[in-house]
Image: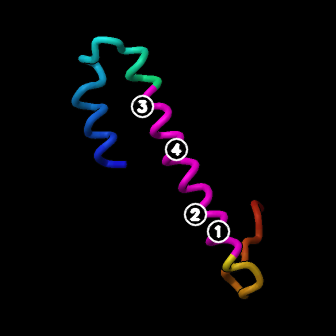
Amino acid sequence: MQSELDAHFANGCGAADLGAEMARHRQVMMGHTAHLMTRTQSMMGMMAGRGMMQWQGCR
């Protein structure tokens, strides 16, 4: 993710097609977000039923 952010900061504003760069960057970041959400759900599933580490939801 850091390399994507570095590339976007370096090239984002100077891109010939700013709209295309924004769309590309958004797609990459959405992919990172989806990956992190999947990993989080997986970890929460492994913790289910294990005492204080069990997900209790929002309070």
Quadrant where the C terminus sits is: bottom right
Q: CA distance from mark 1 to mark 4?
A: 17 Å
As shown in the figure, which amino acid type bears the numbered disc 3? His
Numbered-mark total? 4
- Tell me the residue that label 2 is attached to: 39
Q: Residues within 10 Å of mark 1 (few under 14, many from 20)?
A: few
Instruction: Please identify the quarter of the rendering in which residue 13 is found.
Output: top left
Q: CA distance from mark 1 to mark 2?
A: 5 Å
Q: CA distance from mark 2 to mark 4?
A: 12 Å
Left/right of residue 34 with respect to residue 18 in the rendered view: right
Looking at the rendered structure, the secondary structure element under dot 4 is helix
As shown in the figure, which amino acid type bears the numbered disc 2? Arg
Instruction: Please identify the quarter of the rendering in which residue 49 is found.
Output: bottom right
Mark found first going from the N terminus, 1 or 4: 4
Q: Residues within 10 Å of mark 2 (few under 14, many from 20)?
A: few
Residue in the picture at 38% in, 22% down = 21
Q: Point out residue 57 in the picture as x, y percentages from the top left corner.
A: 76, 64
- Tell me the residue that label 4 is attached to: 31
Mark found first going from the N terminus, 2 or 4: 4
Q: Which residues are magenta?
A: 24-45
Compared with 48, 28 (above or below) is above
As shown in the figure, which amino acid type bears the numbered disc 4? Gly
- Tell me the residue that label 1 is attached to: 42
Query: Which label is found at residue 25?
Result: 3
Residue 33 covered by magenta stretch: yes
Assess whether mark 4 and mark 1 are in contact (beta carbons under 8 angstroms). no
Q: Point out residue 25 in the picture as x, y percentages from the top left corner.
A: 42, 31
Residue in the picture at 32% in, 40% down = 5
Assess whether mark 2 and mark 1 are in contact (beta carbons under 8 angstroms). yes
Query: Which label is found at residue 55?
Result: none
Q: CA distance from mark 3 to mark 4?
A: 10 Å
Residue in the picture at 73% in, 72% down = 55
